[in-house]
Structure formats: structure tokens, C-alpha cells
Image (tube, rainbow, N blue to C red):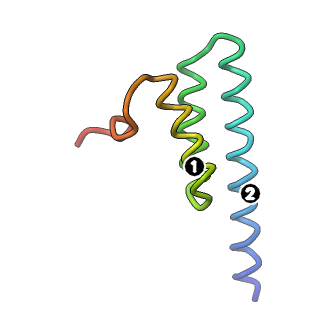
């Protein structure tokens, strides 16, 4: 029971962290820091992964700022 509760709390904390990155990205873009905003959109997308529409929106914002396809966001190995 405690394990399930901890898992729920961690999920909520992850979503709150993702919202923080989303707000920071919007703020930084308004202030004229597009590359910082793109990095924050990418972080938000990773944290929003369990919620597909929010993750997709974050990736679209990243693609818009960077003018690159999403597949180029991953490290080249």
C-alpha cells in the first residue's frame, strides 16, 4: 500500500516539475531567450511523457523554436 502511494506522489511531483519547465519556457521565450526556452520545452516533454497530448505539445514548441525535427533532439550515438 505504501509503495502505491509513493508511486502516486512521485507521478504528481513529476507533473508539477513539468509544469514548472513549461512556465519557465514561456517566460524565457518572452524575455528573448529562445534556446533556453527550447531546452525547457524538451525537459517538459520528457516529464509529460505519461500524458501524450501534453508531451506532444511540448515537442511541437521545441520543434518550432529549433526549426528541427524531433528526432534530432536525441544524442547521436
Number of marks: 2
3 vs 69, left or right, is right
3 vs 64, left or right, is right
Q: Residue sitting at 71 percent across and 82 percent down?
A: 4
Closest to the observer: 42 or 65?
Answer: 65
> Whole-Å distance between the Cαs marked 2 and 1?
16 Å
Closest to the observer: 46 or 77?
Answer: 46
Q: Residue 10: percent from the left, percent from the top?
A: 70, 64
Question: Label 1 neighbourhood size at 10 Å, few (<14), some (14-19), many (20+)?
Answer: many
Q: Would you name the residue on which mark 2 appears?
A: 13
Please, which residue is most extreme toward the bottom here?
A: 1
Q: Earlier in the sequence, mark 2 or mark 1?
A: 2
Q: Residue 75: percent from the left, percent from the top?
A: 32, 39
Comparing marks 2 and 1, which lies closer to the viewer?
1
Q: Residue sitting at 71 percent across and 30 percent down?
A: 24
Q: In which quarter of the image is residue 1?
A: bottom right
- Mark 2 falls on what kind of element? helix
Q: In which quarter of the image is residue 11?
A: bottom right
Image quarter where the C terminus lies is top left
55 vs 9, left or right, is left
Q: Quadrant of residue 6?
A: bottom right
- Mark 1 falls on what kind of element? helix
Q: Would you name the residue on which mark 1 appears?
A: 55
Amino acid at each position: 500500500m505504501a509503495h502505491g502511494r509513493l508511486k502516486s506522489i512521485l507521478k504528481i511531483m513529476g507533473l508539477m516539475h513539468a509544469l514548472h519547465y513549461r512556465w519557465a519556457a514561456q517566460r524565457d521565450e518572452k524575455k528573448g531567450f529562445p534556446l533556453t526556452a527550447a531546452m525547457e520545452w524538451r525537459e517538459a516533454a520528457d516529464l509529460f511523457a505519461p500524458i501524450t497530448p501534453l508531451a506532444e505539445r511540448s515537442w511541437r514548441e521545441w520543434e518550432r523554436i529549433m526549426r528541427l525535427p524531433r528526432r534530432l533532439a536525441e544524442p547521436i550515438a
